[in-house]
Amino acid sequence: MNSGLLIASLLAQTLLAQTLTQRDLNLAKLGSRDQLTAKVAVPRGYAVVIGISDYQKLEKDQDLPFAERDAESVYEVLISKEGGNIEWQNVRKLLGKDATQARIRQTLEEWLPSVATEQDRVIVYFVGHGLVDDNRAGYLAPYDVDPRNVGGTAYPMSRLSEVLANKVKSRWKVLLTDACHSGKITPNSTLSTVNDTFRQLPRGFLTLNSSRESERSFEDPTLSGGHGVFSYFLARAWMGQSDDDPSDGVVTADELVNYVRREVRKYARDRGENQTPTDHGDFPNDLILGFDPGRRQKLTQASIELANGTLVVEVNVDNVEVYLDDNRYGVASAKQPLRIPGLASGTHTLRGVHSDYEPVSNEVNLIPGSTQTVPLRLHYRKTVKPGAQAKYDDARKIWDRSGASKADLLKAAALLEDAFKEDSKFGAAALLSCRVVAALGDSAAALKHCRRAVSLDETSPEARVMFGVMLLQTGDAAEAVRELQRALTQSPKDPFVPSVLAEALIQVDRYQDAETAATDAIARDANFAQGYLMRGEARLPQNKFDQAAEDYQQALRLSEFRSGGLRTFAFFAVGTGMTKHRSGRAALHRNQKAVAYFGLCSCEFNRKNFIRAINYCERSVKEDQSDPDTQILLGQNYLELFNRDNRREYLGPAQHSLEAALRLQPHHERESELKKQIAQIRELIPLVR
């Protein structure tokens, strides 16, 4: 994707960009009622999403500004219930520095074959550079590729072919590549040679490449905030815009390929460029790539024919989030309209959302093949009724007071309920209600308040973070991660958001992804203690004890943990009832310093430095005397010392710690094991000098 060439082309053709030529009519076939009411069996899905914008060893002008944004977009579509319909835990995302040769190899060659069965569908998506070596062998370029040693540092296409053809046993397999951006990386990596390597892949699965022959794959900085053209229309296809043969809520491989080829080719030609996605390979006629049950249900009531068109959304204020049919499409500003090409014809609902204004909606009937401009004028600033504001302010004073009692919190909850009765659009009251009710221990009620807060202010990352945390608390991990990832895009600079996402990923055992999120928090603020704490928590279960210990130490050096910031965002400053698991990871634990010391104790225990571990465990107990897991780990350290040195002096402290754990939590998940160890200690004490 040569963004410089594309920008020049766009500047030269501004009028053309504003008035696209009439598109050929591509009328959709509406599925029969029998088709629409028939049950759809969607195979379980697994996917690998890889995207690299900034390469470690390439020149800056060879970077791809929007590649990682494209990968994020495809990832969000794949895990969406209205798109790929794949459980998020079944998708591995490797972006930027995480997309190393080693990580790509491990994900494709070990993880993917180990989970995907014959009845599953498998999707591999790559956006980045493609390379060719002196022997005309093709490669995908990972983050750490060295153009002077392509064979040793890139990922071979031949190996990818072997993995997908033979190691991954699934019947439904798709490879999507956006890798033909430039011929400048190595002398042999011309557009023709890179494209030729994709044509040489086995025919046993569907391959869709972003361009053909000597064509370049383009990026467009004006396309929904900046995207690769291929990946943009790929995501739109998955979200149902390709569902036209028949239109039945199911996106098949044929529909997706036809839509992406047609729309990319048309979009590029309207701007004086050539880009035609190319597919090859044999795949089953029933290859389902996406499914939207809600859309299918609506279509049972429909009788209109569908086609494609473009909407241009104009707004009167800056930073307006635009939703099309309840799906977020991008941000529009007063001087920068948002273009949404490649849409199905018929009725669409556009909604503009801004934190300072009342949201506005506009329904438009999109004519087949047309480009229509739709204004979204935000005129009414959000206001709060004075009585509701006064009650909110009183509740806020209670909440902000450290050490608020249960009675105080109940009073605050009642004030907020009254405030909301006076002003049902008071989003801040809904959000604070979520926090207060969560602190009172009613997670189900708190979840309802958070859901209401998000619906009232979709632009608020605070509300979305709290909603994600409550989803996690009530057991809906998949939705929690989705909400937190959306909050991440809404708050690109705040380090707190990725640190909470890291915490959520830790709770669902996605430790590598959690480490990436925590690293993002640190990149946003190198002095953000919680980022280091969460990265230590993510590294500990991966047995990265040296690195985890460094993170815990850094967290302690920065150690105030911004308690005020924690109260602003989430409820765990008051406490949630969630406790650490025996792996040593924290679950939104309120005493952050205790967690750091506990993590250091765990690291030293695993490194068999038991004396040092005991010192850290004792510090953790001093910070938080209510935690049974720290007492258990402290006791295990003393037992390990006894096993090593056979000294009686270690048995007493071990017994004391294990008994303390059971006093704190009589029905601990390790209750029977702990009681057995205590009994053994009592038997040993008289026998050992």
Image (cartoon, rainbow, N blue to C red):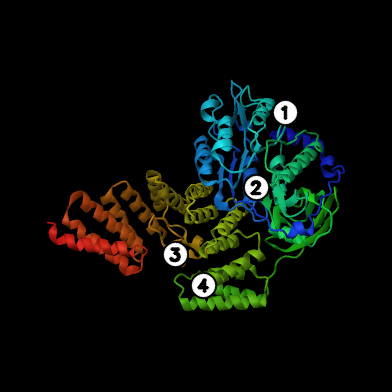
Instruction: First in sequence, mark 3 or 1: give its number.
Output: 1
For the residues labelled 3 and 4, the Cα–Cα distance comes to: 13 Å
Report the amino acid beneath label 1: Glu
For the residues marked 2 and 4, what is the alpha-carbon distance in whole angstroms?
35 Å
Q: Residues within 10 Å of mark 1 (few under 14, many from 20)?
A: some
Q: Sequence order check: which comes first, mark 1 or mark 4?
A: 1
Q: Is residue 436 visible?
A: no
* Amino acid on which the number 4 mark rests in the picture: Asp
Q: Distance between the residues labelled 1 and 4?
A: 61 Å
For the residues labelled 3 and 2, say whether their Cβ atoms are less than 8 Å apart: no
Q: In this view, does 421 lie above or below 643?
A: below
- Of badges 1 and 4, nearer the viewer stands 1
Separation of residues labelled 3 and 1 (CA atoms): 57 Å
Element type at mark 2: helix
**Which residue in the structure is indicated by mark 3?**
578
Look at discs 1 and 2 and give the one toward the viewer: 1
**Residue type of the residue flagged with mark 2:** Ser
The residue carrying pointer 4 sits among few (fewer than 14), some (14 to 19) or many (20 or more) residues within 10 Å by Cα, namely few
